[in-house]
């Protein structure tokens, strides 16, 4: 059996590993346009900051893949004949091909002279330029824009963020949670700002802004190879043609709520990679529909969310609890939890900011997947000890608040 994988990111690298685990004798060729092996793109803001050197974020090197008898080729694939399963230039045909080419940053406006962050090379270039800069403008207050803002702030640069939407982290949290986060961020943020163009360090919007450097973080466009397109895949990562699989940011998939989404999270890309790798090697694996668990830590705040935002769930009910993560007689840390449920109390989403936010959201991912109700979650025990957690934690209290609203 011969398997080709195009791209060695979270999806492609994971696919190669699981293909090898599934078929010990398969011939596996992994094409990678970059040459670092599999590295964490999510850690790039910390490379920019100098918190870690580029080598440190390489999770599986080219040599590591070769030791697993995976032929790692540092080579860009230009085109694929999907019907014949042949990669242009190699003349070899494969039993299965996994397309895992990821995405590239996209700008909705001309952005001459601006920087973008997606690859290791981008991070190294931005880091070198930022060392020479005094001030910087970041366009886009999403996850990447905010993580970069923290990095530049730590480097001592004066940071200004311009965001088109009315609140920061618009895809991650609702406006009320975003306002809470914003109060704790020590950089200049302008929301509702529509940028028209960047021209050599000058940002043209309702007024002109100038800085030594401009970084655009406004989202991604899936990468495709010739003869492929943004690939719509099912839960087996099948792309609609015999022997062709796709995984990661170059795909679209139906989420748990029945919406077609472009994949843009490493957590999902890696799970798709696992699925595609097993199936391409002859297995029969099906992934769970994504509930969209997401998290970050910026300016000292842990932020996490799962499922639908209140504004995405028509007719929903929400409740927000703000308090401490320990009993009142202990010195706890701040925690804010917002729960979103439908009119019957079925849990649809959760957003949390503060100590243990990701763990709270991970609990809610299981609740959403199992279609649990706020009544059950309000009664579900949480582990308790005064030095670790209160008897009724923030999540049970927030669910209880919705239950009372439903009565
Ligand atoms: C700065 C940053 C921070 C992020 N933080 C988070 C986070 O905290 N949590 C989270 O869940 N997600 C995060 N993400 C998103 C996450 O990194 C992506 O969802 C994930 O990397 C997607 O994996 P992928 O394998 O599809 O694509 P990629 O990781 O982009 O990998 C694709 C690979 O394919 C290669 N390639 C492309 N075309 C070809 C070709 N024609 N031939 C050969 N090789 C090719 C590329 O060079 C690349 O190495 C972050 C992304 C960035 C950029």
Image (tube, rainbow, N blue to C red):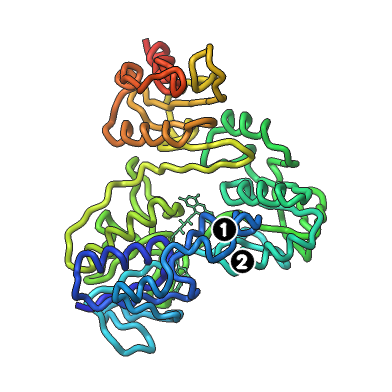
263 sits to left or right of 207? left
In percent of the image, x 40 and y 19: which residue is there?
385
Q: Are marks 2 and 1 in contact (CB under 8 Å)?
A: yes
**Distance from Cα at disc 2 to Cα at disc 1:** 9 Å
Query: In front here: 172 or 196?
Result: 172
Q: Is residue 324 visible?
A: yes
The vertical placement of 182 against 6, above or below, is: above
Image spot of residue 285 (x, y percent): 21, 56
Image spot of residue 296 (x, y percent): 53, 43
User: Which residue lies under the disc numbered 1?
Assistant: 44
**Mark 1 secondary-structure assignment:** helix
In percent of the image, x 47 and y 32: which residue is there?
356
Query: In front here: 407 or 369?
Result: 369
Q: Is residue 315 visible?
A: no
194 sits to left or right of 238? right
Image spot of residue 407 (x, y percent): 37, 9
**Beta carbon at label 1 within 8 Å of ligand 1:** yes
Q: Quadrant of residue 87?
A: bottom left
User: Which residue lies under the disc numbered 2?
Assistant: 122
Where does the N terminus fall, quadrant-wise? bottom left
Q: Residue furthest front?
A: 387
Mark 2 vs 1, N-terminal side: 1
Query: Label 1: few (<14), some or many (≥20) within 10 Å?
Result: many
Query: Label 2: few (<14), some or many (≥20) within 10 Å?
Result: some
In percent of the image, x 76 and y 50: which residue is there?
156
In percent of the image, x 65 and y 57: which residue is there?
50
The vertical placement of 405 against 128, above or below, is: above
The vertical placement of 331 against 177, above or below, is: above
């Amino acid at each position: 059996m011969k398997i080709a994988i195009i791209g060695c990111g979270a999806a492609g690298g994971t696919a190669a590993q699981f293909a090898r685990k599934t078929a010990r004798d398969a011939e596996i060729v992994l094409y990678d346009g970059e040459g670092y092996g599999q590295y964490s793109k999510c850690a790039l803001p910390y490379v920019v900051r100098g918190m870690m050197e580029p080598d440190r974020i390489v999770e599986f090197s080219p040599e590591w893949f070769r030791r697993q008898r995976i032929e790692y080729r540092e080579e860009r694939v230009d085109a694929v004949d999907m019907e014949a399963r042949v990669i242009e230039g190699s003349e070899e045909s494969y039993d299965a091909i996994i397309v895992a080419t990821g995405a590239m940053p996209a700008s909705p406006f001309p952005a001459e002279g601006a920087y973008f962050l997606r690859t290791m090379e981008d991070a190294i270039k931005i880091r070198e330029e930022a060392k020479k800069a005094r001030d910087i403008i970041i366009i886009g207050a999403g996850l990447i824009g905010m993580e970069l803002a923290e990095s530049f702030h730590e480097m001592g640069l004066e940071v200004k963020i311009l965001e088109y939407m009315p609140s920061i982290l618009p895809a991650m949290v609702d406006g009320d949670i975003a306002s809470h986060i914003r109060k704790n961020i020590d950089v200049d943020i302008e929301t509702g700002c529509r940028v028209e163009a960047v021209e050599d360090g000058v940002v043209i919007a309702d007024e002109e802004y100038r800085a030594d450097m401009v970084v655009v973080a406004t989202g991604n466009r899936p990468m495709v190879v010739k003869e492929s397109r943004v690939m719509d895949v099912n839960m087996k990562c099948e792309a609609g043609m015999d022997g062709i699989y796709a995984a990661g940011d170059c795909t679209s998939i139906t989420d748990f709520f029945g919406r077609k989404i472009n994949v843009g999270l490493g957590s999902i890309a890696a799970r798709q990679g696992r699925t595609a790798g097993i199936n391409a090697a002859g297995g029969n694996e099906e992934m769970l529909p994504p509930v969209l668990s997401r998290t970050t830590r910026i300016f000292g705040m842990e932020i996490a969310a799962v499922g639908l935002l209140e504004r995405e769930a028509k007719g929903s009910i929400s409740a927000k609890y703000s308090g401490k993560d320990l009993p009142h007689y202990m010195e706890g840390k701040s925690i804010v939890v917002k729960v979103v449920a439908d009119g019957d109390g079925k849990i649809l989403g959760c957003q949390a900011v503060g100590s243990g936010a990701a763990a709270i959201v991970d609990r809610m991912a299981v609740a959403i997947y199992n279609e649990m109700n706020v009544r059950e979650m309000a009664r579900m025990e949480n582990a308790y000890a005064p030095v670790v957690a209160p008897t009724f934690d923030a999540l049970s209290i927030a669910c209880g608040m919705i239950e009372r609203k439903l009565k």
